[in-house]
Amino acid sequence: MTGSTPSAEPVATPGPAGEIAAGYAFTGPALDLGALLWDGACLPEHRIRIPLAVLNRHGLVAGATGTGKTKTLQLIAEQLSGHGVPVFLADIKGDVSGVSAPGVPNDKVAERAREVAQEWAPAGCPSEFYSLGGIGPGIPVRATVTSFGPVLLSKVLQLNRTQEQSLGLIFHYADAKGLELVDLKDLRAVVAFLVSDRGKAELKGIGGLSTVTAGVILRALTAFEQQGATQFFGEPEFDTGEFLRTGPDGRGVVSVLELPAVQDKPQLFSTFLMWLLADLFNDLPEVGDLDKPKLVFFFDEAHLLFNGASKAFLESITQTVRLIRSKGIGVFFVTQTPKDVPGDVLAQLGNRVQHALRAFTPDDAKALKATVRTFPHSPYDLEELLTRLGTGEAVVTVLSEKGAPTPVAATRLRAPQSLMGPVEAAALDRAVKASPLWSRYAEAVDRESAYEKVSAEQAAAEAAAEEAARAAEAEKQAKAAARAAPRAPKEDRSLAEQVVGSGLFRSLARSVGTQLGREISRSIFGTARRRR
């Protein structure tokens, strides 16, 4: 099994080191992280492990830049794959794609394997590569605006609470009237309609939409589109169930979302990751505690998700993280310090891998002290230890098979068996094009949706208005002629009255609303997916 070693009876060691080691002597399947560090020595006979069954209890991988967080993700991912558990990884910097290829033996790898008693052999994992909207290499991952929902979109657009509520009202209206918001031009069309002379009356009964707020939303959408966001929204919409696949050999597929091409849009990709997670939460059934999770989802650069988030948004994240465990999904947040994660979320992260922290400034020192306070009591001087850990070393505490926290353990981590670096661009492109998912998601589809319906109704209304004007002029001329001629029988209705009273001249909402007339059910995050 990739990245794991057979279970062995723990070696009895007196004193604190022995007590720590005893806390990791699990009987069931577990992932091997590395060997215990104590009193300046590496003790390879004492393995630090995470039980497979508790990986749906979530976790945190933290540490300063350059301390080895990415390699830790790779180490955990390849072992999960070996146990038949699918993995999702966000590749921010472009250096995680190597998980798909066998590692390259060298002196450093051999030395690390010897230090931790690891039987190292090169091995890659079955992998799929994705990209947001097709920007960069990977199978395009798209969402419709309708399914993305108003809460997450407000976060991306950086709207305030009032503007977020107005956007929610717009989505509610579109849902109820069957106006499908597939892409951003659909949303723009509906907003413009609701502040037009014909559309203003539609929302009066439920609060209305001010022209000022609509203007803010439209300007935010314009700025968003200028960042290239139009490619992220559309169809075919990605089915997040694709992340739950295993390979023909039973190993879990590692899904790598390639994000280097959009790393200058942090609000977008962090919020898009939250959509993926929320969509999984919305679709999957309750399963309770399993022998192994259905999927482990690594949420990189997690601080970007929480920066500037509203109270309601944070409450939604907290609730999703709390409840998704029972769906068989484990979530690991990856960031620099635990203080980047709100306390209510941090309290739910039972598995912790803390790499080194720096204390170069007063703020660094404050963050270090705050991090130490988040760990259980320990025989280590954690404040000192966390500043002198080397690359590839970490302080670990996880949940035992009974759900109790294990003792804090300084750990020298094992070496990943897959390639520690990116694969070549040509190899990545070949892997993407060879995927059976490529033909399903590669080509964008632009079908009739809200924009086309609004445009058609607008054109019809304008044509009807012109026809009414012509009819009124004709009637005026006819009346003038009638004064000079014998009186004729009066028509029941004038042509103008017939046109103005026609279905074409009625409001967009009433005509379109009868087409589908069913409201979409939305999750706690406002996400939704119309089931066909």
Image: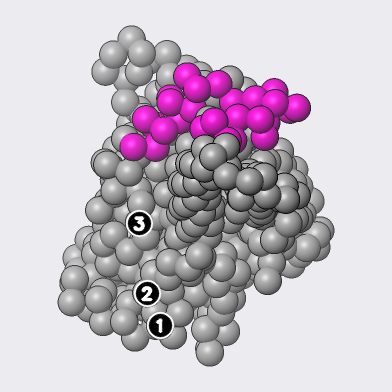
| In the image, residue 210 above or below residue 111 | above
Image quadrant occupied by the C terminus: bottom right
Q: What residue type is labelled 3?
A: Gln
Q: What residue type is labelled 1?
A: Ser
Asked which secondary structure carries label 2, the reply is loop
Distance of mark 2 from mark 1, alpha carbons? 6 Å
The residue that label 3 is drawn on is: 231
> Magenta stretch: residue 190 in it?
no
* Residue at x 18%, y 72% (from the top left corner): 424
Badge 2 crowding class, 10 Å Cα cut-off, few under 14, some 14 to 19, many 20 or more, is some
Count of number-bearing discs: 3
Q: Residue furthest top?
A: 362
Front residue of 150 and 256: 150
The residue that label 2 is drawn on is: 442
The magenta stretch spans which residues? 196-222
Front residue of 65 and 86: 86
Name the dominant secondary structure of the magenta segment.
helix
Disc number placed over residue 439 in the picture, else none: 1
> Magenta stretch: residue 206 in it?
yes
Q: Where is residue 141 in the image (x, y as percent from the top left)?
A: 43, 63
